[in-house]
């Protein structure tokens, strides 16, 4: 069956007339699905949001994946979504930043299978035939023991012991009711970003389009780039262990004991800071002093020792001014940031809690938001802790956490049916 969704939005480039892009896709719940004869799903929602903000007219057509890729090659479409990086398309199209994330986990009925030596080569592996997981396994020299066409068949093979583990997208597994997901143990493998391959022909005509598209994505991801509660729980566990010693450093304690008064010139300093960073201008003396202070050097040295798991660490006062940082941040004033506001709110609500932390974007249905760093291709979550002096929260320390690295370090052994947060942390 063929589904067509045509959305006539505003004219994008009036001097060239109305634009109507054709974008091909296929049904792949929960990213693209049919709802009452219309396309819906996480990837579709993100794409609609970006196109609306860019005021670009477009239509989306459901076709088989092979035809969708061929249509991009031969110029019959302007793009295909949502797909992972495909070397076969690189000569004909360029991939956008992620619309959504596939979250690849190993699943087993026996958690011991996820901890065996020589994992996963020593195990019988099951995957969906023709899936991204099958291609990745074979590229890495791990030949699946069983490949099947449907997820319910794959889960049946696991249930009857024909395979030891399966590699699949966590979000797809959670939608499958054939096997109670609370019976499965899981181990994190990797995030796989899915984006839009825009045709080289389109980008030759409009060279700025891909950059404009990517620039809008952070405000349009919705539920597409989020952590589950179980992932957030694992991340908190590792970070809590990592940072315990750092938070007791004498230089940090000295900073908290001698907190500066609110900066009356913070607006001007924030403007100068942003301009200096953006245009690579010489840093003013006060900025150099902040970046080279003993506490900033302590943070930088700690981050370098833990560079595999952390991209940045910075400390903001309760008023919002930046006090110290391991790297050059984009802003001086952090007072309007969720990480500062919400962390201080939690500290006020739970004055006696020994361990509190806030993950940006956490809410009732999400463990936290994940940012994608285009320059490093890292997936980053920002975890913040209140810093107290004499019982009062006077500052906030924020860690940029490389989520994939931390989840791999944790071993990713998560029993899906358990949802208990760490003592003292806030996971709604």
Image (tube, grey):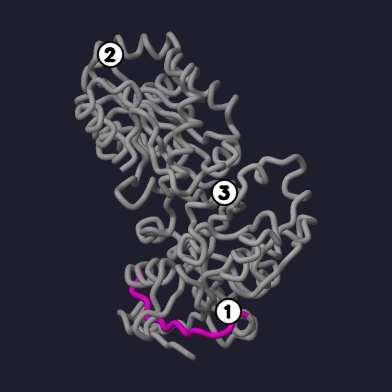
Task: Check disc 1 and report the residue beneath it.
Answer: 201
Query: Could you say where residue 262 lies in the image, as x and y percent from the top left?
Result: 21, 22
Q: Is residue 202 above or below residue 100?
A: below
Residue 299 drawn in magenta: no
Q: Is residue 268 left or right of residue 18?
A: left
Near-viewer residue (83 or 230):
230
**286, above or below 329, in the image:** above
The residue sitting at 75% across, 52% down in the picture is 123
Q: Does residue 63 belong to the magenta stretch? A: yes
Q: Are marks 3 and 1 in contact (CB under 8 Å)?
A: no
State the CA–CA distance, disc 1 to disc 2: 59 Å
Q: Position of residue 212 (x, y in %)?
A: 43, 64
Q: Nearer the viewer, residue 271 or 121?
A: 121
Residue 1: x, y in percent? 49, 91
* Front of the two marks 1 and 2: 2
Which residue is rendered at x = 57% and y = 36% of the image? 410
Q: Which residues are magenta?
A: 54-65
The residue carrying mark 3 is 186
Residue wearing tag 2: 389
Q: Where, quadrant-wise, is the C terminus in this rendering? A: top left
Alpha carbons under labels 3 and 2: distance apart: 40 Å
Q: Nearer the viewer, mark 3 or mark 1?
A: 3
Q: Residue at x 51, y 78 (%)?
A: 25
Residue 19 visible? The answer is yes
């Amino acid at each position: 069956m063929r589904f067509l969704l045509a959305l006539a939005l505003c004219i994008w480039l009036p001097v060239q007339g109305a634009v109507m892009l054709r974008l091909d896709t296929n049904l792949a719940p929960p990213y693209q699905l049919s709802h009452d004869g219309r396309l819906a799903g996480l990837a579709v929602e993100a794409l609609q949001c970006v196109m609306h903000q860019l005021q670009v007219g477009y239509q989306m057509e459901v076709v088989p994946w092979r035809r969708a890729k061929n249509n991009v090659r031969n110029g019959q479409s302007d793009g295909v979504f949502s797909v992972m990086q495909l070397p076969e398309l690189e000569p004909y199209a360029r991939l956008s930043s992620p619309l959504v994330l596939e979250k690849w986990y190993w699943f087993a009925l026996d958690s011991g299978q996820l901890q065996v030596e020589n994992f996963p080569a020593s195990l019988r592996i099951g995957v969906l035939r023709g899936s991204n997981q099958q291609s990745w396994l074979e590229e890495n020299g791990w030949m699946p023991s069983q490949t099947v066409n449907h997820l319910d068949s794959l889960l049946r093979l696991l249930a009857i012991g024909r395979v030891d583990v399966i590699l699949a997208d966590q979000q797809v597994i959670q939608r499958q009711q054939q096997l109670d997901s609370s019976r499965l143990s899981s181990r994190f493998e990797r995030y796989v970003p899915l984006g839009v391959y825009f045709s080289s022909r389109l980008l030759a005509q409009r060279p700025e389009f891909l950059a404009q598209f990517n620039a809008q994505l952070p405000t349009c991801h919705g539920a597409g780039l989020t952590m589950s509660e179980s992932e957030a729980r694992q991340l908190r566990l590792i970070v809590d262990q990592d940072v315990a010693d750092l938070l007791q450093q004498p230089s940090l304690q000295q900073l908290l004991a001698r907190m500066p008064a609110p900066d009356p010139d913070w607006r001007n300093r924030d403007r100068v800071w942003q301009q200096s960073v953006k245009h690579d201008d010489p840093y003013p003396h006060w900025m150099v002093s902040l970046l080279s202070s003993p506490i900033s050097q302590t943070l930088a040295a700690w981050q370098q020792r833990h560079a595999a798991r952390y991209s940045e660490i910075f400390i903001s006062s309760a008023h919002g001014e930046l006090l110290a940082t391991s790297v050059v941040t984009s802003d001086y004033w952090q007072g309007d940031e969720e990480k500062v506001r919400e962390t201080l709110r939690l500290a006020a609500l739970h004055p006696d809690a020994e361990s509190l932390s806030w993950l940006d974007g956490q809410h009732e249905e999400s463990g936290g938001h994940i940012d994608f760093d285009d320059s490093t291709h890292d997936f980053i979550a920002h975890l913040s802790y209140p810093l107290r002096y004499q019982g009062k929260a006077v500052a906030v320390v924020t860690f940029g956490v490389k989520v994939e690295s931390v989840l791999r370090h944790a071993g990713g052994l998560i029993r899906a049916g358990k949802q208990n947060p760490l003592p003292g942390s806030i996971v709604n």
